[in-house]
Image (spheres, rainbow, N blue to C red):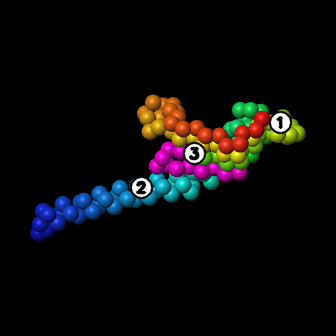
Amino acid sequence: MIPRQMIGRLRSRRALLVVAAVLAAWAVAGFLVLPYFLRPVVERKIAERLHRPATLRRLSLNPFALSVTMEGLDVKNRGGAGPFFSVERLYVNLEAVSIFRGGPVIRALTLTKPSL
């Protein structure tokens, strides 16, 4: 028969491993997987909303800080004739309350080198 202390330790270790695995999956998904798949979606959504061609050089997410960084956002005039709007870097940091309120609650917003 296994002593109760040992059973408690095994459960604690198992719980710790589950938490570590969930955090690791959250980090891999947020830092590596999601930016790869979301960048073309963000480009397409911006282009659809503004009815202008748009490109985005890089998209970064930080799932622990709930922040998004877009680098090299370039929106062209209709037909792609010339620049309409560009931003070297756009950083948005959300509050954790955003998850429960159903809408974004922005803690910080930083635009670097905006150009109209």
Q: Give the structural element (helix, strand or loop) at label 2.
A: helix
Tell me which amino acid carries mark 3.
Answer: Val
Residue 67 percent across, percent down from the top left: 53, 45
Front position among marks 2 and 1: 1
Q: Residue 39 carries which label?
A: none
Q: Report if the CB atoms under discs 1 and 3 are less than 8 Å apart.
A: no
- The disc, 1 or 3, on the residue closer to the chain's N-terminal end is 3
Report how many numbered discs are placed on residues in the image.
3
Q: Report if the CB atoms under discs 2 and 1 are less than 8 Å apart.
A: no
Q: Residue at x 34, y 61 (%)?
A: 17
**In terms of depth relative to the viewer, which is nearer, 69 or 6?**
69
Residue range corresponding to the magenta coloring: 57-67
- The disc, 2 or 3, on the residue closer to the chain's N-terminal end is 2
Asked whether the viewer can see residue 38, the reply is no
Disc 2 to disc 3, C-alpha distance? 19 Å
**Mark 2 neighbour density, 10 Å: few (under 14) some (14–19) many (20 or more):** few
Tell me which amino acid carries mark 2.
Answer: Leu
- Per the image, the residue denoted by label 3 is 68
- Per the image, the residue denoted by label 1 is 77
Front position among marks 2 and 3: 3
Q: Which mark is residue 23?
A: 2
**Mark 3 neighbour density, 10 Å: few (under 14) some (14–19) many (20 or more):** some
